[in-house]
Image: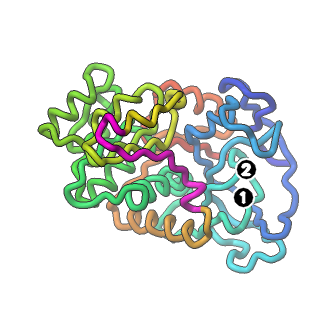
Amino acid sequence: MVAAVRVHKAGGPEVLTFEDIEVGAPGAGQIKLKQHACGVNFIDTYFRMGMYPSPVGMPFVAGNEGAGAVTAVGPDVTDIKVGDRVAYVAPLGGYAAERLLPADRAVKLPDNISYEQAAAMMLKGMTVQYLLNRTFKVGKGTIVLVHAAAGGVGLIACQWANHLGATVIGTVGSKDKAELAKNAGAHHTILYRDEDFAARVKEITNGKLCDVVYDGIGNDTFPKSLDCIRPLGMFVSFGSASGPIKAFDINLLQHKGSLFATRPTLNHYAAKREDLVATANDLFDKVGSGAVKIPASHKYALKDAAQAHKDLEGRKTTGSVILLP
């Protein structure tokens, strides 16, 4: 029996139950992992509250990101062996001291990436990798708006976009978060609670507006995000921290400048094994070189997962949140 955090019914952070579970031997194509760190992400709250249905029904072990050492491999697993250090973004089951995992979802960790770093960055870092390199190709001279620039994805996006030569504008909720975003590479910050962010973007860019807006907030920043984008620019909605965007009127895209809009997810961008490995390796390279730094800003014991969710949803966290089994 090993410690895990399970959800027996949809609801608030209080439904996260710390209990013992049985983890069996790996089946065909699976590996067994002794976890050293588990990532906490906003998507975990969507599964917990029932916004996203659990693919395995109830109860389920929360979480879909982590890092650890391989303790057993099942039949048909050839490229991963016992003792390998690996990290993953995979199906539910992440908030546990041990877990089974599809081997084709695990990637080997370089020696210079720690377990805690890996658990703090796999979902968020690979998300930033595809957002900036594939969803919209960011480069020298690109003007980028990043909402929640001091959050887990935001701090990575600011660093990476800056590294690629973009001008980075970030929205934040406080002066302290503005400092964090600036230190991460944001050239301009906007206090969205105190300022009209669309008006400030227009002012900052001298009316040129942004080439792309990366929005993980959702309901609270829509449709005003569209007013920040130049004609033929792109609106990238990759999260719903304030709730989903409802009743999207596609004609808005015409009226705002023949804009492009997309709702991407890592599951599709990394569906093929070769895309997963390439995305992860680019992330490892950027972190290994120092171009992108990944501090695990908030660490909680596994048993305190409910508190981690409360703090995350209460906007009390910055950067990455991890659980330690």
Q: Nearer the viewer, residue 151 or 301?
A: 151
Residue at the outermost top position: 194
Q: Which residue is mark 1?
A: 34
Q: Which residue is mark 2?
A: 97
In the image, taking residue 132 as reference, residue 194 lies left or right, namely: left
Label 1: which secondary element: strand
Q: Nearer the viewer, residue 15 or 204?
A: 204
The answer to whether any part of residue 149 appears in the image is no
Structural crowding at the residue carrying mark 2, measured as other residues with C-alpha within 10 Å and reported as few (<14), some (14–19) or many (≥20): many
In this rendering, is residue 121 above or below 254? below
Structural crowding at the residue carrying mark 1, measured as other residues with C-alpha within 10 Å and reported as few (<14), some (14–19) or many (≥20): some
Q: Which residues are magenta?
A: 254-270
In this rendering, is residue 241 above or below 186? above
Kind of residue indicated by mark 2: Ala
Residue drawn 22% across the image and 41% down it: 209
Which circle marks residue 73 in the picture?
A: none
Residue drawn 62% across the image and 59% down it: 88
In this rendering, is residue 301 above or below 158? above
